Amino acid sequence: MKKFTLGLLAVSFLSLGAVVACGGQGSSLVAYDFAISLSNGSTVMNKGEEAHVNLDEIGGNPEDVREFTYTSLTPSVASVNANGTVTALAKGETIITVSESKSEKTHSLKITVIDASPADGGFNYASASGKSAIEKRTEILGALEKNAMDNHLTGITLFENGGYVKYKSRVNLPTTNYITGYGFGLLSEGSLKEPMAAETESAYKNYLHSASSSDPHMVNARDNDGSQVSDLEGYITSSYWGTKMNDTKDGYVWYPVLAKDTVKFNGVDRANDRPIPVYNGTEVKPDEDPNPLGLYSTWRIYVKTGADGLKYRYSGTPWDGVDYDHRPVAIEDYEFAFRNLLTGSHGLSRGSQIASDQTYGIVGAQRYYNNTNVKDMSDEKALNVWNNMKTKGELGLTTGHD
C-alpha cells in the first residue's frame, strides 16, 4: 500500500498595542474651536430635503455658554433657521455659515442642491436624514442583499470567488436548491433536453458547452493567480478525491479518485473518503478525536499507483508525452508534482504563494523554495536539495510504501 504524508505548520502572531494618555490637575485646556457638518453625511441635498447642522465642539471651558448664529449666503437655494435646520429650496449652490459669539469663531460649509425628484408617491431615502430614514435605508439594503443571494445574482462576500453562471434552457440541473459548498450539481447528475443547434460537429451536439467572458491565455493553474484557470483545469486533471451529490439531492459526499478506494485500519478495510489525520505518529480513527483541540498538523493520504491498475493514457497529436501511454503511475509521480511546484527557479506563482504563507501548507516549503531560487538550477540539483531536506527531516512531505 502506498502512502503520501503532508506536514502542515501553523504559525500564530499576536500583536499588542497600547495607548497612554497623561494628564491631571493643573493641565491647561485646549483652546476652543468647533467643526460643522450636515446630519445627512453629505454636502449634497435634494430639493425639498431638510438636514441639521451638526456641531463638533473641541476644547474650551465646559462652563462657558455658547451661542451660535446660522446664515445662508443664498437663502433662495437653501435656507437655515435659528436652530440650524437647513431646507433645500432650489437647484444651485450656497454657503452655510455658523458663528460662535464668545470665541468669535466662524466656519462655513458649501451646500449643493440638486433636483432629483422621486417618482409620484416615492421618497428619497438616499439623502433623507433622521433615525427613521437611516433605519429604512438599512432595511432596503438588507432586502436587496437577501434577494441577490437568494436568487444567486452575486457571490456571498464571505467567499472570494463569487460569480454568475447562466445556463441555456436545454440544461436540466439535478436540483434547483443550492447546496452549500457544492452548488447545483454536475451535468452528469442532470441531463440535456436537446442537442445544441449551434454546434456544427454532430459528435459534439450532445455535449455541455461552457463559455467565459474573458480569455485566460493559458490553462496552467500552477502559474495563475485567478480562479478562472483553476475552473478550466478541472476539466483536464484529476484530484485525490471528488465530490458528488447524495441520493436525496440536499448534500454531497466524497469519493476517491486518485486516492485508494479502501485502506486498512487494524487489519480491517475501511472506506478511504478523506485524508487521515495523524496524532503522535498514529492514524486517528474516524470516530475518535484524541487531540483536545481537534487540530492536526500531519495528514496521511493513500494513493493509487500502477499496482492498483492506475496507468497514464495518451491520445492525440504525437509529442513527447506519448512515451507515457500505458506507463504505470508511480508513487514518485505524486511527489514530483510538489517538487516541480515548489522549486524556486521554476517561478510558478502558486509555488511562491505556498512557500511564503506560513499559516498552512508544507513544513519547510519556504526553505526549499529559497534554496532552489537560482535561474539556471536544473531539476536534478533541485532533487538533491529536496532529498537532503527530507533525509534531515526538514521537509514536511514524505512518501513511502506499506
Image (tube, rainbow, N blue to C red):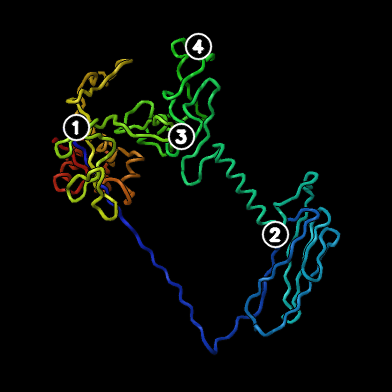
Camera-near label (1 vs 3) is 3
**Mark 1 lies on residue:** 331
* Quarter occupied by residue 232: top left
Question: Which residue has dot 4 on it?
Answer: 200
Residue occupied by mark 2: 40
Identify which residue, 382 or 79, lies in the foreground.
79
First of labels 3, 4 by sequence position:
3
The residue under the point 29% across, 52% down is 294
Which of the two marks, 2 or 3, is nearer to us in this view?
3
Q: Is residue 402 visible?
A: yes
- Mark-to-mark CA distance, 2 and 3: 41 Å
The quarter of the picture where the N terminus appears is: top left
Real-space Cα distance between discs 3 and 4?
31 Å
386 or 271, which is in the foreground?
271
Give me the residue at 23% from left, 38% from top: 301
Question: Seen from this angle, which residue lies furthest top?
Answer: 202
Type of the residue with mark 1: Ile
Mark closer to the chain start, 1 or 4: 4
- Residue 132 position within the rendered picture, expressed as x and y whole percent measured from the top left: 69, 58
Mark nearer the N terminus (2 vs 3) = 2
The one nearer the camera, 383 or 49, is 49
Secondary structure state at the residue bearing disc 4: loop
Q: Is residue 242 left or right of residue 267?
A: right
Q: Which residue is mark 3?
A: 183
Name the kind of residue labelled 4 in the image: Thr
Q: Horizontal and vertical percent for residue 236?
A: 36, 26
Q: Amino acid at mark 3?
A: Gly
Mark sitting earlier along the chain (1/3): 3
Whether residue 101 sits left or right of residue 191 in the image: it is right
Q: Secondary structure at mark 3?
A: loop
Check if mark 1's residue and mark 4's residue have beta carbons within 8 Å: no
Question: Could you say where residue 110 lies in the image, as x and y percent from the top left?
Answer: 74, 61
